[in-house]
Amino acid sequence: MNAKTSALLCLLAIPAHGAVLWSIGSDDQTQDGNGDATLGDLATLNGVEFNVSGVQESGQDPLPGNPANTGGSGGTRDIDDDYYFAGVYTTAAGDYTPVGNVAVSESYYDRALTNGDPNMRWHFNVPETVGASDTLTFTVDFYNLNESNPGDTSGYDMTFWVDGNQVGNMQPHSDADLSATQSWDFALSDLGGAAEQGPGFDH
């Protein structure tokens, strides 16, 4: 498939409880991708709403990223592959130095996947309200699949990883199913279990 640019929104939820742990963006057929201070996209963390703005992607970045990107546009924009929700990150899930205390959730996020920038990472602490038998669902909803030539067919083969381990299978997504969401289910055990809930653990 000829993959170009895909803008998206995402959320992590426990459907059986009707609970959304976190979300970035709304399913309203719009996207604030300007990277400016208008912060026109809705986000939530454990039921608390705040606003964010998408920023044009800037290439692949290594962990752990910067928890205080300042957004912007053009060649001076400040963004990376790592979005941090407010939390405490002192124990890493991999070979990197965690960023420590993040007092407030970031205001800017990487707005799209591209051929040259195919990764997005969302960092969060797992609330202690999540139970061992709960099913967590990560959902992606595309806003658009952008082609420089409108006649071309866009598509992405997407994989979802939790703490360095792939969850579920690769899922293709193309122009034909643009309006459909994609979801992956996983459990607390994929996040290290009860021993890695609460502040400190970078997921």
Image: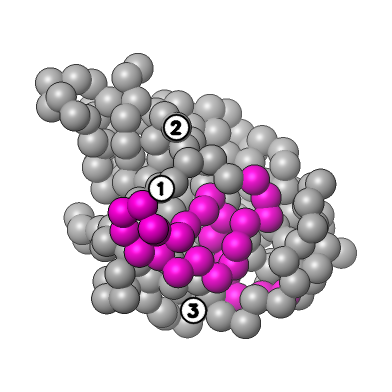
Is 77 inside the magenta-drawn segment? yes
Which portion, as a residue range, is magenta? Answer: 62-88
Using the image, tell me which numbered label, if any, was put on residue 116. 2
**Residue 131 visible from this viewpoint:** no
Question: For the stretch drawn in magenta, what is the main secondary structure?
Answer: loop
Q: Please state the horizontal and vertical placement of residue 172, each as a whole percent of the image.
A: 42, 26
View extreme (right): residue: 195
Say what secondary structure mark 3 lies in.
loop
Q: Residue at x 32, y 19 (%)?
A: 2
> Mark 1 or mark 3, which is nearer to you?
1
Name the residue tied to disc 3: 47
Q: Please state the horizontal and vertical placement of residue 108, each as a whole percent of the image.
A: 43, 66
Is residue 46 or residue 105 the one in the foreground? 105
> Mark 2 or mark 3, which is nearer to you?
2
**Labelled pair 1, 2 in contact (Cβ < 8 Å):** yes
Quick one: label 2 or label 3, which is nearer the N terminus?
3
Quick one: label 1 or label 2, which is nearer the N terminus?
1
**Amino acid type of the residue that numbered disc 2 sits on in the rendered structure:** Gly
Is 194 inside the magenta-drawn segment? no
Name the residue tied to disc 1: 57
Circle 3 crowding by C-alpha within 10 Å: few under 14, some 14–19, many from 20: few
**Amino acid type of the residue that numbered disc 3 sits on in the rendered structure:** Gly
Is residue 47 or residue 152 the one in the foreground? 152
Say what secondary structure mark 2 lies in.
loop
Using the image, tell me which numbered label, if any, was put on residue 191. none
Is residue 71 or residue 101 the one in the foreground? 71
Quick one: label 1 or label 3, which is nearer the N terminus?
3
Circle 2 crowding by C-alpha within 10 Å: few under 14, some 14–19, many from 20: few
Q: Residue at x 47, y 57 (%)?
A: 79
Q: Residue at x 42, y 80 (%)?
A: 49
Say what secondary structure mark 1 lies in.
loop
